Amino acid sequence: MATPSLNSRVQSLVTEYGVFWQFWPQFEQTHGERRLVGFEVELIGSHTSDLNHVDPTCRTCRHVRLVLLAIADFMPGDLTLSRKSVAYNIDSHSNSIVCLPALGNRSAVWVSIYFVLNRANGQSFETDLLNEVRTCLNRWGIHQR
Ligand SMILES: [Zn+2]
């Protein structure tokens, strides 16, 4: 668990960088059957509304990425379900910047957390895990978009 002071520090950075998350299911096609194999949770943040700000060397962008990465590192440990044989990988997309239509084409940085499901996880597992992710991120003041 995070300490209250760390929590409030993270929450103020979340507000400052307008951090939100998105969710993408990942499917695999085998023998004509589509199967859910995992999902990706993207944490996205931006520090400026300047549309011309696309600078891979920007120190503040790097700081936004570090904050997102810290959240991504912390999150799986906070999920009880993740201890039930769910693998995850974190990709910080270092040196990459995206321009998001959802943000009016503002530049943003993002960190992806890939959860890898396996057959033993069962049917309702994905929903349960996603609910835990949502609850966890809500606590940090990060909402789905
Ligand atoms: Zn920047």
Image (tube, rainbow, N blue to C red):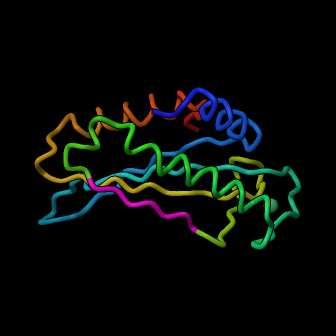
Q: Considering the image in quadrants, where does the C terminus appear?
A: top right
Asked if residue 60 is positioned above or below residue 145 in the image, the reply reads below
Of the four image quadrants, the one with ligand 1 is bottom right
Count of picture labels: 0
Image location (x, y in percent) of residue 139:
53, 27
Is residue 106 or residue 3 the one in the foreground?
3
46 versus 96 height, above or below: above
Relative height, residue 24 to residue 12 (above, below): below
Give the position of the N terminus as an image quadrant.
top left
Q: Position of residue 124 (x, y in %)?
A: 21, 34
Q: Position of residue 93 (x, y in %)?
A: 57, 67
Q: Is residue 136 left or right of residue 54?
A: left
Q: In this rendering, would 48 be left or right of 141?
A: right
Q: Is residue 7 left or right of 106 when viewed as pictured?
A: left
Q: Position of residue 8 (x, y in %)?
A: 66, 29
**Residue at horizontal 24 percent and vertical 52 percent from the top:** 117
Picture quadrant where residue 5 is located:
top right
Q: Is residue 53 magenta?
A: no
Principal secondary structure, stretch drawn in magenta: strand
Residue at the image position 57 percent from the left and 32 percent from the top: 140
Q: What segment carries the magenta color?
A: 87-93
Judging depth in this view, the residue of 2 and 41 nearest the camera is: 2
Residue in view at x 78 percent, y 54 percent: 106
- Residue 89: in magenta span: yes
At a point 28% along the width and 55% down the height, the residue shown is 87
